[in-house]
Amino acid sequence: MGERGSDFYDNDAVFQTYMERRQGQDNANDTLEKPVMLELIGDAAGKNILDLGCGDAGFAAELLGKQHKGLSYTGIEGSTNMVQAARKSVQGLNARIEQSYLEEWTYPADTYDLAISRLAIHYVKDVDHLFRSVYGALKTNGSFIFSVEHPVITSTLQPSGIRTNWIVDQYFVEGFREQEWLGGSVKKMHRSIESYYTALQQAGFRVEQLRESAPQRAFFTDEETYLRRQRIPLFLFLSARKLK
Ligand SMILES: C[S@@+](CC[C@H](N)C(=O)[O-])C[C@H]1O[C@@H](n2cnc3c(N)ncnc32)[C@H](O)[C@@H]1O
């Protein structure tokens, strides 16, 4: 297993399984995660956007397609498989993809209006450092909006699959926890909600919104999946602003 979270996605079998699931009907990303991200982002027209761990950059194509007025996009991504897919997604758009680990990229100062990250930051060990880098890269009044796997999920030690119960344990013991997922072995960083919140404040941000992935019926085609998603929150979202 590689050193950084994105190396996991360079296992070709994992990558393929991930992409299949990511596009499956009523997948958690589209039913639970994306609607909240879109709500928090609001109007992105005219913004210079930085996307941390952009994956295949399908979101860039969507944002630039919908709200293309003056919008520019930079995606940072560590996995070669993802970078290849991302460069295809953004062909012809006002977007660029840079291959780098989030921990190692040189963040330019005062450049972006909006930094986003969808389900990538729970792979990063040192969020204090990352959040300070993002803070520095934002313009005054810029915002940082991200989703992560919810801490009640990163704290369960059960194998993945359709679960019937969850054992939240060692909640306040932060650190990498290894799990079998998508046919591979991956380390995701567990930290508490309080810890994400405080790390943002310590980096200088004013935290503006905290959301969880409460399911909204309209986004599901299948009633059973909707009911199942009421059991436990899968994702946590935070929205923060750089005031000066
Ligand atoms: C679950 S995927 C989400 C992809 C995309 N944001 C989306 O929502 O479709 C997580 C992504 O973060 C990337 N990633 C994880 N850790 C990373 C790191 N340390 N540096 C750069 N990219 C990373 C992975 O390669 C993967 O593409």
Image: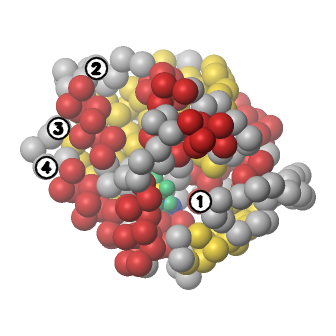
- Dot 2 falls on a residue whose secondary structure is loop
Residue at the extreme left: 92
User: Residue sitting at 45 percent across and 73 percent down?
Assistant: 14
Question: In terms of sequence position, does the residue under pointer 1 or pointer 4 come before the other?
Answer: 4
User: Residue sitting at 73 percent across and 42 percent down?
Assistant: 232
Disc 2 to disc 3: CB gap under 8 Å:
no
| Mark 1, residue position | 123
Disc 4 to disc 3: CB gap under 8 Å:
no
**Colour scheme of the rendered structure:** secondary structure
Residue at the extreme front: 223
Q: Is residue 99 above or below residue 92?
A: below
| Mark 4, residue position | 91
Question: How far is mark 1 from mark 2, CA to CA?
Answer: 29 Å
Question: In terms of sequence position, does the residue under pointer 3 or pointer 1 come before the other?
Answer: 3
Q: Is residue 9 above or below residue 137?
A: below
Tell me if the residue at label 2 has its CB under 8 Å from ligand 1. Answer: no
Q: Position of residue 93 (x, y in %)?
A: 15, 40
Question: How far is mark 4 from mark 2, CA to CA?
Answer: 19 Å
- Amino acid type, callout 4: Gln
| Mark 3, residue position | 94
Tell me if the residue at label 1 has its CB under 8 Å from ligand 1. Answer: yes
Foreground label between 4 and 3: 4
User: Residue sitting at 34 percent across and 22 percent down?
Assistant: 44
Occupied quadrant, residue 170: bottom right
Question: In terms of sequence position, does the residue under pointer 4 or pointer 2 come before the other?
Answer: 2
- Amino acid type, callout 3: Asn
Q: Is residue 232 above or below residue 4?
A: above
| Mark 2, residue position | 45
Question: In terms of sequence position, does the residue under pointer 1 or pointer 2 come before the other?
Answer: 2
In this picture, residue 104 sits left or right of residue 163: left
